């Protein structure tokens, strides 16, 4: 879906009962954003419409550091469809691609979490997998920032003008959360940390 297209379906606010979508405050009112239950891969168009309504329609999106987040036209596809790379050590069949694309139901359902993670993250850290990139970590509920019950990961890339280009987003496990928060010795790994838990 092009960014110029207007979504026609009403979706729940991703963070509770705040109806003021024209002026998002970045202040969530509920603990866990609702998940989208729109079907499977056959409903990609519906998820793209939700992505437009819940995220792109709220632009400009500003993170806690005052930096603007921008999106490519295929940002929703990067969320819903995961690229799976084959083990380089495994012998590939003739003509077999090194990677393949797979629909990821959990990623699609977590689309409402993206806006919360970008505007009110638990932490912003350096991306250990891709030099120069950054990760917005969202842990809910916020009572326990070390071992939250729900964990979410958003990757961005710094671009010209001090902006951040959204790359992808997905829920993660506790061990992945721990690894993302653990920086290399002697480096400033944590770029931002939420000052106080709200709930």
Image: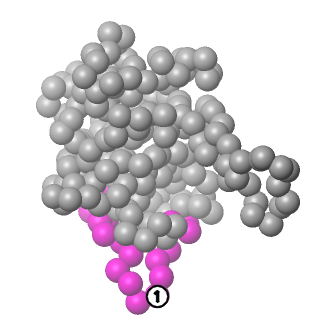
50, 149: nearer the viewer: 50
Q: Residue at x 28, y 31 (%)?
A: 56
Q: Relative to 24, is 99 above or below?
A: below
Using the rendered view, name the quadrant where residue 50 is placed: top left
The magenta stretch is 178-199
119, 50: nearer the viewer: 50
Q: Residue at x 57, y 51 (%)?
A: 172
132, 144: nearer the viewer: 132
Quadrant for the N terminus, please.
Answer: top left
Rendered image coloring scheme: one colour
Q: How many marks?
A: 1
Residue 14 lies, in percent from the top left, at 36, 30
Label the magenta part by its dominant secondary structure: loop
Using the rendered view, name the quadrant where residue 15 is placed: top left
> Any magenta on residue 92?
no
The residue at which mark 1 appears reads as 185
């Amino acid at each position: 879906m092009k960014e110029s297209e207007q979504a026609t379906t009403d979706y729940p606010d991703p963070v509770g009962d705040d109806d003021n979508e024209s002026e998002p405050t970045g202040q969530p009112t509920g603990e866990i954003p609702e998940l989208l239950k729109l079907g499977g891969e056959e409903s990609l168009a519906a998820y793209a419409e939700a992505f437009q309504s819940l995220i792109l329609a709220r632009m400009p999106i500003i993170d806690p550091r005052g930096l603007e987040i921008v999106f490519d036209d295929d940002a929703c596809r990067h969320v819903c469809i995961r690229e799976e790379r084959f083990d380089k050590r495994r012998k590939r069949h003739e003509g077999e691609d090194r990677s393949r694309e797979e629909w990821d139901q959990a990623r699609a359902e977590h689309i409402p979490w993206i806006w919360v993670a970008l505007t009110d993250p638990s932490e912003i850290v350096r991306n250990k997998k891709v030099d120069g990139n950054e990760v917005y970590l969202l842990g809910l509920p916020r009572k326990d920032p070390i071992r939250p019950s729900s964990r979410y990961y958003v990757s961005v890339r710094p671009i010209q003008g001090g902006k951040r280009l959204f790359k992808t987003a997905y829920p993660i496990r506790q061990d992945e959360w721990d690894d993302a928060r653990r920086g290399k010795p002697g480096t400033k790994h944590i770029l931002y940390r939420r000052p106080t838990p709200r709930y």
